[in-house]
Image (spheres, helix red, strand yellow):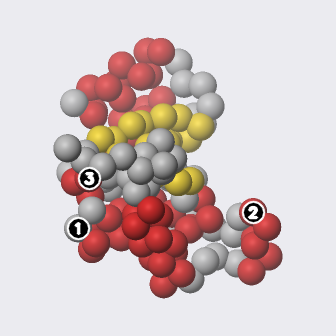
Amino acid sequence: MTAVTPFDRVVLGTVQLGMPYGRLKDAGVMPEGAANDLLDAAWSLGIRDFDTAEAYGASAARLSGWLVKSGHLQAAHVITKIAATTPPNELRVAAANAIDKFRGARKITLLSHGAIHRRSWRVIYMTAA
């Protein structure tokens, strides 16, 4: 049985890994080494759930790269998002690209930044299966 930590229910938002954000936004994009250090620290605390999005600059790519290089991909739950403004005829490709970055993760949750019509989700669902 896996030990429960106080951070088992924490989801780490990763926007700051790939674009200027928050109180340090004036410093520019976080250096990749600092991003990896932050992810290492979160993992060591027991955080296994990560929130990212295609709209977060290099965030999704950095998270994916770190998960693979660190060997943690299979134990991670990744919540990733696509833009609700994606044209309907491009949703399948956008969803596939977002999911493919984390294929092999313990769990992948796909969301959208804003409302997408329910018929479009059917197209996206067929992509993810």
Type of the residue with mark 1:
Gly
Q: Position of residue 2 (x, y in %)?
A: 25, 47
Per the model, the C-alpha gap separating discs 3 and 2 is 28 Å
* Residue identified by numbered label 2: 22
Residue appearing at x 74%, y 80% in the figure: 27
Q: Nearer the viewer, residue 89 or 73?
A: 73
Q: Nearer the viewer, residue 75 or 54?
A: 75
Q: Is residue 94 visible?
A: no
Q: Label 1: state its secondary structure.
A: loop
* Residue identified by numbered label 3: 75
Nearer-N-terminus badge (3/2)? 2
State which quadrant residue 68 falls in: bottom left
Type of the residue with mark 3:
Ala
Q: Is residue 65 left or right of residue 71?
A: right
Q: Is residue 85 above or below residue 47?
A: above
Q: Is residue 12 left or right of residue 128?
A: right
